[in-house]
Image (tube, coloured by chain):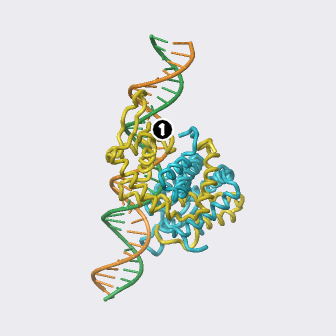
Chain colours: A cyan, B yellow, C green, D orange
Amino acid sequence: MGTPLPRDPIAEARRNWERRGWGDVAAPMAAITAIMRTQQILLARIEEILKPFGLTFARYELLALLGFSRDGSLPMSHASALLQVHPTSVTNAVDRLEQAGLVARSPHPTDGRTTLVGLTADGRRLAERATAALNTEVFAHSGFTDDDVEQLIRVLGGFRRRAGDFVDG
Amino acid sequence: MGTPLPRDPIAEARRNWERRGWGDVAAPMAAITAIMRTQQILLARIEEILKPFGLTFARYELLALLGFSRDGSLPMSHASALLQVHPTSVTNAVDRLEQAGLVARSPHPTDGRTTLVGLTADGRRLAERATAALNTEVFAHSGFTDDDVEQLIRVLGGFRRRAGDFVDG
DNA sequence: TCCAACCCCTTGGACGTCCTAGTAGATTTC
DNA sequence: GAAATCTACTAGGACGTCCAAGGGGTTGGA
């Protein structure tokens, strides 16, 4: 999985599509496949940076989200909605972060169904250090030009809105 | 995980980054996060279409790759390289596809280390039907305009080449 | 010739994601 | 006010991905 290929496998797939008479959908197929592969590359880079902190990307995202919330604490359902992952994924992440002493669960003061997750002091410190590392090690040399970034945000933002992720502009 | 959010959580994150004084990396952070989320949406759509065929995206990719190879058969290491996944992921996919009678393993004629994976007749038929379904149900209404597709292929292709995925132009 | 280095594949384990229940609390409806 | 419905979280399981380790097959240099 290390050595570069002599040819772009996605361009190859696109040619195969065209050869079979699916030229009308070959380009979107290639674009979607490229998104899949790019995500894989980026995720690997991020995980590599987070590993020394004992974090995965899923756990980091939760930590960062809590760090930006008013009082460092949120209902689990709210975290699930904002991170746009299944509730059980939040349960999983909270279990492990709680084990590590980075977050703590507490009951909601008025709604007995709801559990709040809050950062511990350790959790807040680690989130800040991990963010600093990601900023300098990943985001600062993302591999995209400023123009690329501009276009990606515009194109993918439109896609996500049309896909029903959010409703505002 | 179903109802749209009132605000774009990625734009929100970007504003948080800027507020903390990380404005220099806020845009790439937003672009990368958008790629992550877009991949998640697209993968869910694809898996939904493949489910009636008893396939996952990982298994479909292997089936499709074999369908485009000369004789419908490849060394497992070659499949791993072309699909750009870990060898154990190929082992896993082949195990399940073989169980379903869609592929078959056979020894390499001259190299005793190598195992070939080949499509069965059932496998080839299913790959064709699944591809047709993806073409009409996903790629034909990708949610991207032709311009979007053009830009994504260009931007992500450049990124992947610089990341060492492949070496040609 | 023969052994060290390398390659190919598999096993076992850790993680994250989702789905399907299932339990408990809150809200709505009649 | 009681029943039906909804909401929040958790347990268990399937799947894909990766890493680490191990067992054979190949190869090339001493």
Amino acid found under the numbered disc labelled 1:
His
Q: Position of residue A164 (x, y in %)?
A: 51, 70
> Residue at the location (63% across, 62% down)?
A153
Classify residue A110 as left or right of residue A43. left
> Residue at the location (34% across, 44% down)?
B120
- Residue A71 in sight: no
Q: Nearer the viewer, residue A46 or A63?
A: A46
Q: Position of residue A85 (x, y in %)?
A: 48, 62
> Residue at the location (40% across, 31% down)?
B108
Q: Give the total of numbered labels.
A: 1
Viewport quadrant of the C terminus of chain B: top right
What is the crowding at mark 1: few (fewer than 14 residues within 10 Å), some, or many (at least 20)? some
Q: Nearer the viewer, residue B3 or A75?
A: B3
Where disc 1 sits, the SS reads helix
Relative to B126, residue B105 above or below: above
- Residue A10 in sight: yes
Relative to C11, residue A140 above or below: below
Q: Chain of mark 1?
A: B
Q: Nearer the viewer, residue A96 or A120?
A: A96
Q: Position of residue A152 (x, y in %)?
A: 63, 60
Relative to D28, residue B25 above or below: below
Q: Position of residue A162 (x, y in %)?
A: 54, 69
Name which quarter of the figure residue D28 lies in.
top right
Relative to A49, residue A148 above or below: below
Mark 1 highlights which residue?
B78
